Structures are given as structure tokens and as C-alpha cells.
Amino acid sequence: MISQIKNLTYKSFLDYTGPAENFKSKNIIYGDNGNGKSSLAIGLYNSFIQSDHERLTYLFNKYYIAQNMLLTEESNDNIKAVKITYGDKNVSNEKEIKELKDKLDILKSNESGLKKKIDGHSKKVLSEIEKIFQDNKKDNKSIKRKPGKDVDRKFNAWCGEYTEAIKQHPDYDYSNSPTSKKIEEEINDIEKAKINELNCSEIDQLLRVIESLMMTGYPELGISNEVLNWINEGLHIHNDKKKDVCEFCHNKFDRNQLLGEINDKLKNETAKKQKYLETATDKLILFKDQLGTLNVNSKVLLENGDFNDTYFTLVSLINIAREELESNILTMQAKIKKMATPLNKKLLSQVKINDIEQLINDLIKKKRKISREKSRELEEINTLIKGVIGFKIKNSTLISSEMALLKQDNKNLSEMSENANDIEQQIESLEAEGSDISDFAQEINEILTDYEVGLKLVPKNDTYFLCHKFNPEREITLDVISEGERNVLAFCYFYCSLLGTEKEIKNDIAGIIIDDPISSLDNKNSTLITAMLEHILKSNAQVFILTHSWKDYLNIIYSKQEEEYGFYECFKENYRSSIRRIKKSVSVYKKLYQEIYQIQKKNFDDIKPEEFLHLPNTMRRVFESYLRFNFNISMATANSIDKIKTVFEFSNRDIDNGKLQGFLNVINVFSHGSIFEYNPKQREIYDSAKFLIKTLKCNNKGHHQKMIEDI
């Protein structure tokens, strides 16, 4: 246990040792702002650290709040929420994560801007490449754009075309682009010429058979093949065997007999030869027509002497062959009608057929050769055109400038991406280091519920968010979390960190130092913090509670005995801070008396609302102290009203008219476990303060003057 702080040199403390009256197990220290109170708290903490290495020491101050609690605003589905982080490691990580995320946001923003710049450079390069491409390929339809939108790939591909072209044509002036229009037109002209191969082997065989048939006479059938076929087809409508009447002439006939006669005639040798000649005639007609389709309408081909000679030789031969074929067809048709008459006519010569086939094949070869020559010529021109395009792209000032910027920006983008990846990995690593605070969160929620604080901690994805206790779906933002609520949330975590099993303060704690536990901006939650302080003061640890608020000081020391507690003031003289003991018995009562006196002296409209909040409890404590000390009346309640009236009736004529009862109602509304639903108005509190001062002044004027003598 620390009895004195020794040789403290820190801010306004200069080699200070004290206080003269040693510290006790439990110590309450008052100090106005600027008198060194917070420096004293740090000095006490360091003294514990130096003197007791085995046991823990806890310090609550503004630095503890900053290091152990962090509130951050986040948006989820466009609904704002406040994330709460507890624990020095978690808070440190969360702050580092926030800094890293801020850096990452800046990087991402810069990365986005750089991507737009890169896109702009790329578009300029691609646009210039397209312009050079269009200007130099002109009407050429065989030269295609390089695929894709990758600028480097396109640029390198066209530069490669220039490199290839200069290998083949090193002396060409690549500042001028040749035209391919004429050669492309010639190639298209050649393609228009349709020369189909002719298969004459079947015709050759056919002519051999026909010549033999033509010179042979066959017995007459007495009926033509056409009539036979017509009758045969007609018999299909007489499938009913019972029918013996012709559907056409209505004469009776024997269907089976007629069908037999027809089949006999159809199977006759003459009929077969006749049928063959009919089929052969159709094939010769088709062959003659095929010969007539040959028409080479190509200026390029016909201007080629070798091709032209072959073509007109073929045309002449085809014309002769077609005339002979026409004569042969007429002869064959006559033979079909008179199969019995032999005809000794010579048909188309096989030599002519072979000559036609050979000439057609020669024309096809000559056409292909000419086409290949023109295609090679086009390839040469295309190589030059692509070389010109590549040359102009490679030597474009605009493209070179934009490509240089593009290269640098891509390098910067790559570095940014690497940095962003590193930061994301750091964030991921820090997030994985987070410690579990679920037990703390559960205990804090129980405390907030017990004291009706309108907030609670809600878990979500391994983190906790603040929400309104009675309306969890309501949006909550940082600006609606008051300074007092922040202080309460931090102190709840500090308090829970002191707890061991069965929610009691841990026994292995050497010292607990608490600097300004109650925020000056938070009156409504002071009851909660005071309750936690009372529990801490019952622990086995040495406790120091420091406050800049006289009101909070009085609340904390109320009912505390000097035998167990040390009451001190941190003050400053000649710019140096010191500690001195405060005598509780007079100081507390006098301070409270002066507070009531000062308020009731004011005009009602000049009093701030927060001044009324603790005034009923302050009046009760002053009145009870006065009664206990002077008249041995311990409680200022309705049960003691008759005794109180007896004491004061000779000094205050208002005692009998009911004002005493109203006064007792007001001062007991927040004390002694009062459960009746009575909420005094500010005017009632103000009137009660005037009533109390008037009553005590009338009862003991000397006492009154003593209490206000130093105001």
C-alpha cells in the first residue's frame, strides 16, 4: 500500500513528497481543473508500478478511455450504426486499421484516377492507330485490324509488320502507301469466271452402247411404251378384284388377264431397249446443256493470251459437239419410235469428248495459275501497306508521347496495387488479432439494463454495435452519443475489467486509481457510476478516486467515515501542486449549505435546468445533518414530521400551513428508496430551497451567518 507519493516531478509537481497525513486504504481527492489532479493520478499509478511488481494496478483517466474504447461510425445497407471497440490491443489495432483503411481509400482513389488517365492515354493511342490504319489501307478489304484492345500488343504487332516488310523490301519508301484497289478488282474479276470440271467417262460408255442399239432391229410391240405405262398406272385404281368394269370406258374387262399381258410386254426385250434409249436420250440432252453453260466473262483471264487461245479453241469445239449431239438426239428419238428399223448413223466422236474434257481441265489450271499470281502480287502490296502502317505508328510523335506516359502510369499503377495489397494484408492480419470481448459485453449490457441506460451492445460479425435499447432498428450516429454516455461506456468496461469470479473485485489488485469518473456533461448517468465506485471502494485494493467536481466529491464521500477514508485536496500555490487533507465534518456540510443558498438567491428564470437535478438530494443531506447534529432526529421523512414541526414551529410560522409536508416530499423524491410516483417541478424545488434557508436562518441565525461567511 502507498502511504505517500515520493519525489514526484511531473508537470506542476516538483520533487513533491506527501501528503503529510498518510494515504489510507481508500482515498477521495478533490482538485479544481488546472491544479495538478490528473498529473497526481499518473504519479500514483507509477508509484504502484515501482513499488508492487507482483500485483496489478489499474488507472482510469482520459488516456485510458482513448486507449481502451473506440467508437466508429459505419454504414450498413444505408443505415448508420456506431461500432464500439474495447481493449487497448483491440483499440490500437482498430485505430491502425482505420489509418490503413484511410490510406487504402486514398490509394484506391488515386488508383481510380490513374486508371482514368491510363484509359485516356490508351484511347488516344488506339484512336491514332485507327486513323493511321484507315488512312493507309484505304479501300483494301483484305488487311484487318489487329485484334484486342491491349495497346502494347497492338503497337508491337504493327511494328512487327514494319520489321517484316523492311526485310522483304528494304528499299521501299515507307512514308507512302501503295494501293491494292486494281489488283483486288482483278482477283474479283477472276473469281467471277465459273469453269466447272466435266466428267465424260459415263457419256463415253453411253455412246458405245447407243451405237450398238441403233444399228440393231427389234420386233415391234404393237403398242408404245408410253401407252403401256399409261395403262399400267391406270390399273392401280382397279385394285378391287370384284371390279370388272373400266372406270374410263365402262366396258367389262378381265383385270388379271390384262395385267398379265401388260407385264409380258414390259418384260419384252424390245421394251427394255426402248426404255434404255429413252433414258440415254435424257442424259445426252443434259450433257448438251452442261456444255452450253461454259461462259468465261473475265476480262483479266481473256487478256491472258495463253488462256484466251485455249478458251476459244474449247468454245469452237463445244459448238461443234453440241450440234452433233442435237442431231444424235433426234436420231435416237426416231429409233425409239421405230425399234424394228436399224439405223447406221455415226454418233459423236469419243475423241471430241476427250478433247473437250482436256481443254476444260487446262482452262481450270490456267485460271488457278493466274489467280495465284495475282494473289501473290496482292500479298506483296499488302506487306508494303502493313509496313507503311507499322512505320507511321512507330514514328508517330503523338503515339510515342502517349506510350511513354502510359508506361510510367502503368508502372505507378502496379506499385499502387502492390501497396494496396500489402495494406489489405496488414488489415486482414490486424483483424485476425482481435480478442474476444463477448464476456465483457454481456456484463456491460447487464449494468446498462440495471441502471436503465438507454443503450445496449449488439454483436454482429465478431464486433459489437451500439443500438437504442427500446428501438434497436432506429439509426444511431456518433453525434447522438453524448460525452457522458461515452464516459459511462468506457467506465463500464474499466469496471468489468476489475471483476473476477462472482462479479467481485479481483483480490490480486494492488491499486485502483480513478481520475474524473463522472463527466461534467453527464448528470443523468452519475448514479450508475457512483454505484460502481461504491463497489470498487469495498474492494481489498487501495483505491484513489480523484474528481474536479465538488458536487461529485461530496456525493462520493457522503456517509464515509474518516477512520476508514482519507479526504484530500489537490491544490496549487506559487505554480506548484501539493496535496492536503480536508476535514470532512465541516467542509461537506458547509459546501452543500452554500450551494443551496446560492441557488435560492438567484431569480428563478436565471437558474439552469441541470442545477435543479441534484438540489433535492443536497437539501435532504443538509437538513438531515442539521437535525441529527442539533436535535438527534436522524431522518427527515414523513414519519418524523411531528418532531420536526415541534422543533421549528416557534421559529417559522409557515410550518403549520402545509409547506413542511411539501418540502419533505421534494427532498425525499430521489432518496431513501422512495417508490412513490412523484416528480417535483422546478418551481417546487426552487421554493423548497428558499423554505429551507429561511427555516434554518430563523432557527439559528448565527449558524446561518457562519455557513455563508466566506461567500
Image (spheres, rainbow, N blue to C red):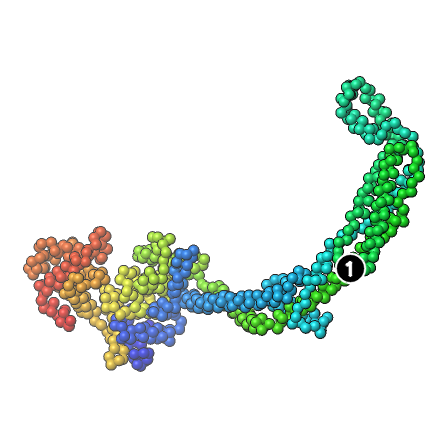
The residue under the point 80% across, 43% down is 286
Residue 128 pos. (x, y %)? 58, 67
The residue under the point 78% across, 48% down is 293
Which image quarter is the N terminus in? bottom left
Residue 639 pos. (x, y %)? 16, 54
Question: Is any atom of residue 607 visible in this view?
Answer: yes
Residue designated by label 1: 303
| Number of numbered markers | 1
Residue 702 pos. (x, y %)? 9, 68
**Quadrant hosting residue 83:** bottom left
**Quadrant hosting residue 668:** bottom left
Pick the front one: 461 or 159 = 159
Dot 1, crowdedness within 10 Å: few (<14), some or many (≥20)? few
Against 22, is 428 above or below? above
Which image quarter is the C terminus in? bottom left
Residue 635 pos. (x, y %)? 17, 58
Which amino acid is tagged 1? Glu
616 left or right of 408 in image: left
Q: Secondary structure at mark 1?
A: loop
The residue under the point 74% across, 61% down is 375
178 left or right of 560 in image: right
Pick the front one: 591 or 683 = 683
332 left or right of 451 in image: right
Question: Is any atom of residue 2 visible in this view?
Answer: no
Pick the front one: 446 or 585 = 446
**Quadrant hosting residue 535:** bottom left
The residue under the point 23% across, 62% down is 610
436 left or right of 32 in image: right
